[in-house]
Image (cartoon, rainbow, N blue to C red):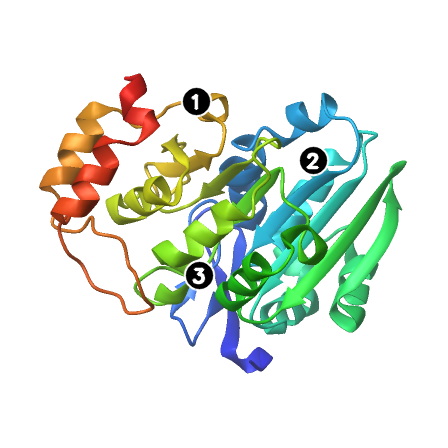
Amino acid sequence: MPSAAYTLVHLTNGAYAVQSLAYGEKMHPGLGPAVEAETLHVGQLQIRARLAQHCGEFVVWDVGLGAAANAIAVLRATRELPNPVRLLSFDDTAAPLAFARQHADQLGYFHGYESHVEMLLRQRRTSFFDHGHSVDWEFHVGDFPALLSHARAKAAGILLPPPHAILFDAFSPRKNPAMWTLPLFANLFQLLDPQRPCNLTTYSRSTMLRVTLLLAGFFVGRGVATGLKEETTVAANAFELVEAPLDGNWLERARRSSSAEPLRDAVYRQAPLSSATWEQLQAHPQFRRS
């Protein structure tokens, strides 16, 4: 997608953000790229604390690279810690990253990583030392749902190393439904290592998304506010990584919702829970705990 498909927008707090004209959506529209990436992803994923206690390589999946604000926030947050970081970014186009790099001065979060981003754009991979620890940053350009399906069909560890943390930042389900289906999150969950605790953050708080994550196998909880969003979502394959888990009261509200049934294919629509989905939710280990 050419750079003409993107523009800079000036947010009310003074920060600049990238807007996709094709999708009609801004990236980090609430707090701005740097602050929102730190608040939504880095802080909630507990990346600093987890990496400080971790031995060996720490793997982060950055789903929806976009203009790279989330990825760079992770790199900046971990630069003083000794363990190596492996960052896998995914997107179906490099165009927003190229556009953002051209406007790095206005966006303000690229400082110190300009040359690494340029290498990523040219070669889809860059390796470097960041304040003493090694970083391997890969950019997988293509159809993420298809990539997950293929990886699950093969030996997963050969294609994609299981993550310790996932930054999930695709465009909205209404505009980009293929990235929010139950098959996608089920494949994602199956590619996790059960012996490797992993958490995921995303800006959406929709009942549909949370039901989807639960049915895929995740434990799911409420996340912090981020400007325009009064609540976000945290999920994990380990219950202890979810600080504010959804409870029975949420489950009853989901049962009454008119928009709770997961998307099972890449067509956006809204529907209440089916009886089969309701039975699956009731049997989820998260609600047997409460």
Per the rendering, the mark at residue 26 is 3
Against 140, residue 276 (above or below) is above
Q: Earlier in the sequence, mark 2 or mark 1?
A: 2
Query: Which is more N-terminal, label 1 or label 3?
Result: 3
Q: Which residue is mark 2?
A: 77
| x and y, in percent, of residue 123 in the image | 80, 70
Position of 70 with respect to 22 (left or right) is right
Q: Is there CB contact under 8 Å for labels 3 and 1?
A: no
Q: Residue at x 38, y 45 (%)?
A: 216
Element type at marker 2?
helix
Q: Say which label, 2 or 3, has the lower sequence index.
A: 3
Disc 3 crowd, CA 10 A, few/some/many (<14, 14-19, 20+):
some
Residue at 21% x, 24% y: name it: 248
Disc 2 to disc 1, C-alpha distance: 21 Å
Q: CA distance from mark 2 to mark 3?
A: 24 Å
Under mark 1, the amino acid is Glu
- Judged from the image, the secondary structure of the residue bearing numbered disc 3 is strand
Q: Which residue is mark 1?
A: 243
From this viewpoint, is residue 112 visible? no
